């Protein structure tokens, strides 16, 4: 099969299109013909070697944890899926090596969700990791009816889904930090935009009135936004960060690391199919242009998601 892979950690140029053996098919796995693969910030962090201390890595390494495609074959222990089924998954395995930037990927059946017919493969591939991160972070801090929620980076891959999911969970109001050029976009998702920067605490207080504090904060940025959030949230146990685990633990804040979950993935993609959640894809690239996709994402100004098509 053709796949994007690398044999050493480094910048985007270490990746290249290669001919590699087809994946093995384990007894509890599905062999999926990849139609689209989501590109996420964690992909370039893996590529740079930042996650070496968290999980085993093996070379040559095919990146990518988000996949949408068609089942080509199923393992001998799989009974609920068949060739031809259209599926999606957050396919993060215990070892980092055989990812989704490829023509084929083997995926444990416990990670697989069914793609509705009215959701295209690009949209499906953009959803799993960002959607699960968004949902699991909101659930970790008990987001529910009546809450006032502040989402940082509300125009980003995780954030733009988070503001919509918060409303699905019953939040009364959702505020979202974003650059001014993205304020209309954030508003279109059902959130009240607020600008980043030194004035954030005062801006939020002016928006919500009362004591100027919110019930829930989801930090997708870190740095100054994390510090400001400590002032803005009523209870630090209802603040979560996906970017700075050590600081979160030091300050009584929950750290969120998304886990594969087929049931939650199905819930999310069914919301997309129903028109209740919108997945924004800024740009797609063919598989062979994965280097360009990484460079775009590393620039830090992507609205929504970037996806590779295979």
Image (cartoon, helix red, strand yellow):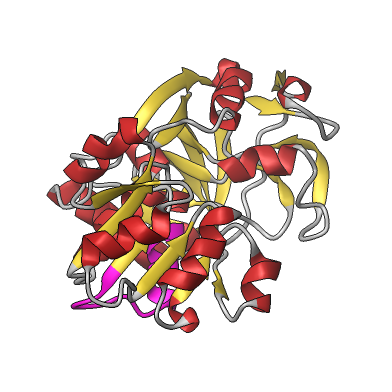
How many numbered dots are placed on residues in this image? 0
Instruction: Pick the quarter of the image with the N terminus.
Output: top right
Magenta stretch bounds: 132-148
**Image position, residue 14 (x, y; %):** 78, 24
Q: Quadrant of residue 187?
A: top left
Q: Quadrant of residue 122?
A: top left
Question: Which residue does the image show at 37% across and 56% down from the upper left?
Answer: 113
Residue 109 part of the magenta segment:
no
Front-most of 96 and 256? Answer: 256
Question: Which residue does the image show at 53% across and 51% down from the upper left?
Answer: 221
Is residue 301 something one can see in this rendering? yes
Q: Quadrant of residue 304?
A: top left
Front-most of 70 and 153? Answer: 153
> Is 2 left or right of 271, judged from the image as shown?
right
Compared with 85, 244 (above or below) is below
Front-most of 121 and 282? Answer: 282
> Is 257 left or right of 166, judged from the image as shown?
right
Compared with 269, 262 (above or below) is below
Task: Check the image and name the residue furthest to the right.
Answer: 8
**Image position, residue 177 (x, y; %):** 37, 49
**Image position, residue 212 (x, y; %):** 31, 71
Residue 140 part of the magenta segment:
yes
> Is 131 left or right of 244, judged from the image as shown?
left
Question: Which residue does the image show at 22% across and 55% down from the upper left?
Answer: 270
């Amino acid at each position: 099969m053709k796949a994007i892979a690398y044999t050493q950690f480094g910048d985007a140029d270490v990746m290249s299109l290669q001919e590699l053996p087809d994946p093995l098919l384990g007894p509890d796995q599905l062999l999926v013909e990849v139609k689209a693969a989501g590109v996420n910030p964690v992909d370039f962090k893996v590529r740079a070697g930042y996650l070496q201390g968290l999980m085993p890595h093996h070379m040559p390494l095919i990146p990518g944890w988000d996949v949408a495609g068609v089942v080509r074959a199923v393992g001998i222990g799989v009974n609920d899926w068949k060739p031809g089924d259209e599926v999606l998954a957050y396919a993060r395995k215990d070892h980092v090596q055989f990812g989704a930037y490829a023509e084929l990927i083997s995926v444990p059946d416990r990670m697989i969700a069914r793609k509705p017919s009215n959701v295209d493969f690009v949209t499906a591939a953009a959803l799993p990791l960002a959607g699960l991160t968004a949902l699991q972070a909101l659930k970790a801090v008990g987001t529910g009816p009546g809450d006032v929620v502040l989402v940082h980076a509300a125009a980003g891959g995780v954030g733009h889904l988070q503001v919509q999911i918060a409303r699905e969970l019953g939040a009364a109001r959702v505020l979202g930090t974003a650059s001014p050029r993205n304020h209309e976009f954030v508003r279109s998702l059902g959130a009240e935009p607020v600008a980043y920067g030194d004035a954030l605490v005062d801006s939020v207080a002016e928006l919500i009135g009362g004591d100027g504090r919110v019930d829930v904060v989801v930090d997708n940025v870190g740095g100054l936004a994390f510090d400001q959030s400590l002032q803005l949230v009523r209870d630090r146990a209802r603040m979560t960060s996906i970017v700075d685990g050590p600081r979160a633990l030091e300050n009584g804040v929950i750290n969120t690391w998304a886990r594969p979950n087929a049931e939650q993935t199905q819930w999310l993609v069914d919301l997309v199919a129903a028109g209740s959640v919108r997945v924004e894809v800024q740009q797609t690239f063919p598989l062979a242009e994965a280097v360009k996709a990484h460079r775009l994402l590393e620039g830090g100004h992507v609205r929504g998601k970037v996806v590779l098509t295979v």
